[in-house]
Amino acid sequence: MRILGIETSCDETGVAIYDAKKGLLADVLYSQVALHAEYGGVVPELASRDHVRKIIPLIHEVMDKAGLESKDISGVAYTAGPGLVGALMVGAAVGRSIGYAWGVPTIGVHHMEGHLLAPMLEPNPPKFPFVALLVSGGHTLLVKVTAFGRYEILGESVDDAVGEAFDKTAKILGLGYPGGAALAALAEKGDPKRFHFPRPMIDRPGLDFSFSGLKTFAANTIAAHDNTLQTKADIARAFQDAVVDTLMIKCKRALQATSYHTLVVAGGVGANLALRAKLQTLDAKVYFPRQAFCTDNGAMIAYVGCQRLLAGERSDLAIKVYPRWSLADL
Ligand code: KG4
Ligand code: ZN
């Protein structure tokens, strides 16, 4: 089985081809970051229009890269949610229509299931069961994963997602949008001893998170000090250390609560090197996708679509998207 996967839930158009036997054959990505940067955030209508412009050329490109023709594809997968409704509609409409035209089955995939299983694309994939920490721009989740498709949410953010907290704090520091990676780079130059940020919700039992207070703490700290690059770097460092520590503590708790010894980390913030280094000190096997597959991509959607189509699942002819869709409903 050879699946064409399409991702258009937010500001990246990703297309990939996954082969059930040979693995990932090709993947291409177009990022809209530059388009949205001048607005300081994703503009949904612009995102939809840009997906429309890019998706067909990217499908041609990925097919050429893999050296395949339409007859070689046995199914199509697209992100059906959660995400921006207009952006999702582009991938769903194109994916569903190609499936119909080529006479192959089609499946709508949950974006966060894509992130969660992205480490399966790596040479040494994790084995079930495991705990997954999903840290993206829109979600912060700790998930108990017993098998493919069996997900129990152990904890989630009660306010901002981690990536959102990174982006908002980066904005306060004048680092542009999305500023997560820029903040991480600046934190490298920061003095870890100058400021100490709180570790939110660690003294409460349970596995939920709260990150919105950290950006306020950053704003107050910057208001009370000078505006030099060094101060900004010190604040970035204190912010990142607080986030990394908090995630580390909750992952440790989740592993203890489940008695599992495997942790999977995925989603955009999973690209953060400080987080990767810290979590690797846990007494557990820790798996990450390669950095390019931490952020949005078509490969993870092609992978999940392949597993679900192999299991006999199919979407019907209606073009449906689910902008709000909990992983718990799968
Ligand atoms: O998974 P993703 O590409 O999109 C969503 O599904 O949301 O995640 C994007 C998020 C953004 O908030 C971005 O700032 C953050 O991941 N991010 C990072 C890093 N690279 C991307 N945050 C911290 N450190 C990084 N190196
Ligand atoms: Zn994502």
Image (cartoon, helix red, strand yellow):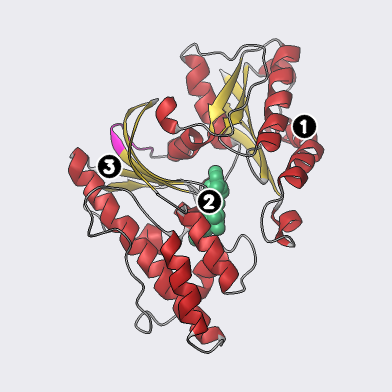
User: Residue at the spot x=51%, y=86% of the render?
Assistant: 230
**Chain-order first, disc 3 or disc 2:** 2
Tell me the quarter of the picture where residue 49 sits: top right
Return the x and y of residue 187 as percentages of the image width and height. Answer: 47, 74
Q: Which element type, helix, strand or loop, lies under badge 3?
A: strand
Q: CA distance from mark 3 to mark 2?
A: 24 Å
Q: CA distance from mark 2 to mark 1?
A: 29 Å
Return the x and y of residue 316 as percentages of the image width and height. Answer: 62, 11
Q: Which residue is mark 2?
A: 137
Q: Which element type, helix, strand or loop, lies under badge 2?
A: loop
Q: Which residue is mark 1?
A: 60
Residue toward you, 265 or 73: 265
Contact between labelled residues 2 and 3, with CB atoms less than 8 Å apart? no
Q: Quadrant of the C terminus?
A: top left
Residue toward you, 91 or 139: 139
Q: Quadrant of the N terminus?
A: top right
Q: Main secondary structure of the magenta part?
A: loop
Q: Kindly tell me whether residue 5 is visible in this rendering.
A: yes
Magenta stretch contains residue 127: yes
**Chain-order first, disc 2 or disc 1:** 1
User: Residue at the spot x=64%, y=62% of the render?
Assistant: 177
Contact between labelled residues 3 and 1, with CB atoms less than 8 Å apart? no
Q: Of the residues tagged 3 and 2, which is closer to the observer?
A: 2
Return the x and y of residue 264 as percentages of the image width and height. Answer: 36, 43
Q: Kindly tell me whether residue 23 is visible in this rendering.
A: no
Q: Which element type, helix, strand or loop, lies under badge 1?
A: helix
Q: Amino acid at mark 2?
A: Gly
Residue 262 image label = 3
